[in-house]
Image (spheres, rainbow, N blue to C red):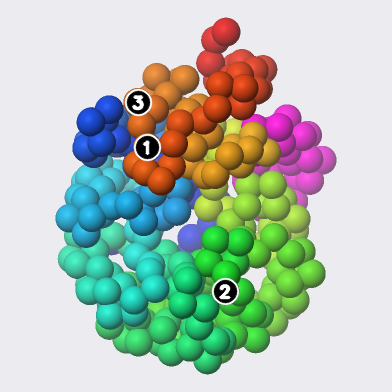
Amino acid sequence: MTNLKNLHGCGTALVTPFKANGQLDEEALQRLVDFQISEGINFLVPCGTTGESATLTMDEHLRVVEIVVQRANSRVPVIAGAGGNNTAHVIEMARRIESLGVDGLLSVTPYYNKPTQAGLVEHYRVLAEAVKLPIIVYNVPGRTSTNLLPDTVVKLSAIDNIIGIKEACGDINQITELAMKIPPDFKLLSGDDALALPIIALGGVGVISVLSNQTPKMMAELTRLCLEGKLEEARTLQRKLYSLMKLNFIETNPIPVKAGLAMMGLIEESYRLPLVPMSEDNKRKLQNVMVELALVKR
């Protein structure tokens, strides 16, 4: 287990590969972990939104985390997704994940229930008390209908093992306020690839990325350049990658990124309902951009 005090850089929100019959593709997952680490990714995040965690059974969720931990073999930290809208169930999941040897947890705000800010504080407080692992909270109101506000994050930052936030609210004003209010050692991570550069410029320490599934080397490089203050080089790389950043969300994530990985021969293009394969028109657009970036051949 790694100390996350120095966590920074680019982490990949890993997809969960499935076979055509809908079962977990364990070999493809191992292959994906090796690809990520060999390309220089800084940490791995299995079983988040991009990992289709909402459609995994508890046993599948634990198996994915177990495979990633074993395959990573301490080469990079592993921060496993453990979120939901039933606090008791999240605690049970987090405790079982903790026993697998992960380095930390990423826990999305409860969705659908629409808790108040006070409810969010209580949810995370009891979760933090239930495990010893460091926890990164995850704010993505576009998916959850709940916005974790800056003053609430400040309250959470006072809880010892809540160490940071993956921020995907998409509002640069809110993120600026957040960056100004959180303690210096509280880790601000971008939850949007396209906003990694400005968020790091505001004091963020990195990104949890969808794009890095396809191009871990370039996304890790972009993050490194931002952290080193080499903004001209970072902007050049951002402009190069921006079309793919956008196309990865032309349909619901992770539909496009899994289609892209299938083009690269890394996984089968297989989803779980209610997600369905990408439209042929959008797939052509995605392929054209991936050809331009030399990720696939025509």
Q: CA distance from mark 1 to mark 2?
A: 26 Å
Residue 127, quarter of the rendered image: bottom left
- Foreground residue, 23 or 214? 23
> In this figure, which residue is indicated by the disc labeled 1?
271
Q: Residue at x 35, y 42 (%)?
A: 272
- Apparent side of residue 103 relative to residue 203 in the rendered image (left or right): left
Residue 54 x %, y %: 36, 56
Q: Secondary structure at mark 3?
A: loop
Reading the chain from its start, which is encountered first: label 2 or label 3?
2
Q: Where are the magenta residues, as a range?
A: 222-245
Q: What residue is pinned by disc 2? A: 146
Mark 1 residue element: loop
Q: Position of residue 73 (x, y in %)?
A: 25, 46
Q: Quadrant of the C terminus?
A: top right
Disc on res. 268: 3
Could you tell me if the residues under marks 2 and 3 are in contact, i.e. CB atoms within 8 Å? no
Magenta segment includes 236:
yes
Q: Is residue 226 above or below residue 30?
A: below
Q: Quadrant of residue 233?
A: top right
Residue 165, position in %: x, y?
54, 69
Kind of residue at disc 2? Thr
